[in-house]
Image (cartoon, grey):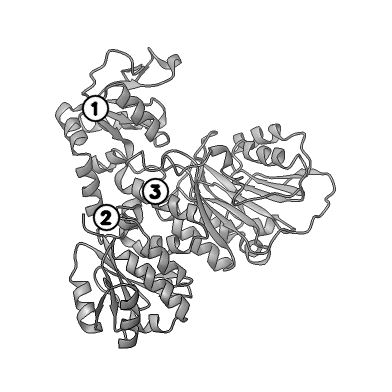
Amino acid sequence: MSAMFGIAVHGGWLSRLAPDVRSRLARALGQAVALRSVVIVDAPEELQRSIAAVSDKITFADGAKSKLALQASPQASWIFVGATFSGPGIIPLVIGKESREPGVAWTGTANGVELLCAVGRGSGLEMALAPSSAEQLSKQLAHRFKSQLDALQRHRSAYVFGAKRLGTLVGAGLKSLGHSVAAYLDNNPAAWGRHEDGAAIQGIDAKLDRNLPVIIGTTRFPFTLSQQLAKAGFTQVIPYPLMTLVDATAFPDEIPYIGTYQDIAAHREKYLSEYLNYGDDRSREVLDALLRYRLTLDSTVVQSHFEPESEQYFDPDLARFTQSEVWVDAGGFDGQTTLNFMSRVGGRYGRVYYFEPDAALMARSRQAMHDRDNVVFCEAGAFSRNGVTSFNTTGTTNGSINPAAGASGDITIAVSRIDDVLKEPATFIKMDIEGAEPEALKGAKEQIARHAPRLAIAAYHRGEDIWQLAELIRDLNPSYQLGLRHYTEGDWKPSSMRIGQAGLKKEVRYPRQSRGL
């Protein structure tokens, strides 16, 4: 397997580094040669001699020839460090100030270049940096699952694992293409014997054809279910995201796969920038695993990279609480996350601001917290403006705001800016609001810019969330450090944790009260 990117370094930039930094980087480049091609462009003779003393495997070239050679490589990208030269298959990497120029990556210091040198062969980041179109990425994935897709076409029938919302959507999609549902499979014995749209619901231990394809009708447990089906003898297991390649109309993209391949192909430099600028190795490992999983649907990839879901907003490495927190829960659902927070601080906190636009869920939340003090209930969606907008209710999960003009929803709800609801500095803002996070962050821009509350932001609703939310937060307050954690076995809940530099607020005492807005 050939390396999917090489490293080119501008000699002028390298010459301007402090001698100790230059020497350290030269050693890193020398070690990187074992993984990929390394070339230094336009290096003065003195620099060439000093680098050759560290490694005799680094190539040197003059600018004109090397640029043409870099462009002539259709199978691999080149990361061009310290230069802004771009071209087909070339991603310039600027050092220092953040770049938003299309196609240009950035890293804050030369340390990011050392991280680049250590990127492993076959890693998710390396795969994402390959100069592939969205169509090519889709074809590569289809080729990986050729046996399963061929079996589906051959049998024109399949089992569907899961008889809930997504499972029944799969069943309807199969029928729209002239296929049949042989049966719905489910781990819930209480469902066995029932029928869904004419197909029986059964357990996987029933007498079944093990060679018939099984489509996993959930995106939440790909590893567990794949392992369970393999152990039961099923040979053709198809994860749901693959079905979008069969027919995007019958099987539309689900969260978190909406626009994934299009975004990776169009914004390779964004993923590279985030990887190089995370503040900890764990975040880089998580991003790398997520990219590899999204590009291969290999459910084993993320197994060592996800944390317990109960820690989603309470990761001790990223968030430590005092007993004077001003906690903002945007997307409260049924109140359990806020109750968890209250428990973790022993019931001692400054105030809670609780946003939930779904009336049924807000009623459940009020009941769950009826005996708690200093809770401000805001029956509205956190957003970038005050007013109303359309909303899809569920009474369970996945209720969502439709911010686009003219967008449809089953009800109209109130929306509010966090900046206008809060009359005091927030210390922690949690958001999981089904894709409306960018707008809600804009509505909290004063809090973020002036007070730097710690932020836990869900980053899984769209393919671009991982880098787009990071850019938005840095626009609002450049002092934030960035981290990434993942909380389910599949690609369901990566959350971006943004940790402010301002430190903890002084402890403030609040009068006991509970009110609504």
The residue closer to the viewer here, 149 or 280, is 280
Disc on res. 289? 3
Mark 2: give few (<14), some (14-19) or many (20+) Cα within 10 Å. Answer: some
Secondary element under disc 1, as helix, strand or loop, is loop
Mark 3: give few (<14), some (14-19) or many (20+) Cα within 10 Å. Answer: many
Q: Label 3 is placed on what type of residue?
A: Ala
Q: In which quarter of the view is residue 28 placed?
A: bottom left
Does residue 188 appear in this view?
A: yes
Q: What is the C-alpha distance between the residues marked 2 and 1? A: 28 Å
Q: What is the C-alpha distance between the residues marked 1 and 3? A: 25 Å
The residue closer to the viewer here, 6 or 205, is 6
Q: What is the C-alpha distance between the residues marked 2 and 3? A: 19 Å
Residue 427, given in percent of the width and then of the height, sits at 69, 55
Q: Closer to the N terminus: mark 2 or mark 3?
A: 2
Q: Nearer the viewer, mark 2 or mark 3?
A: 3
Q: Are marks 2 and 3 in contact (CB under 8 Å)?
A: no
Secondary element under disc 3, as helix, strand or loop, is helix
Residue 174, given in percent of the width and then of the height, sits at 26, 31
Residue at 64% x, 37% y: name it: 335
Does residue 417 appear in this view?
A: no
- Per the image, the residue denoted by label 1 is 235
Residue 431, given in percent of the width and then of the height, sits at 57, 49
Residue 191, given in percent of the width and then of the height, sits at 42, 16
Mark 1: give few (<14), some (14-19) or many (20+) Cα within 10 Å. Answer: some
Q: Is residue 202 above or below residue 505?
A: above
Q: Is residue 88 above or below residue 318?
A: below
Q: In which quarter of the view is residue 50 placed?
A: bottom left
Q: Label 1 is placed on what type of residue?
A: Thr
The residue closer to the viewer here, 448 or 383, is 448
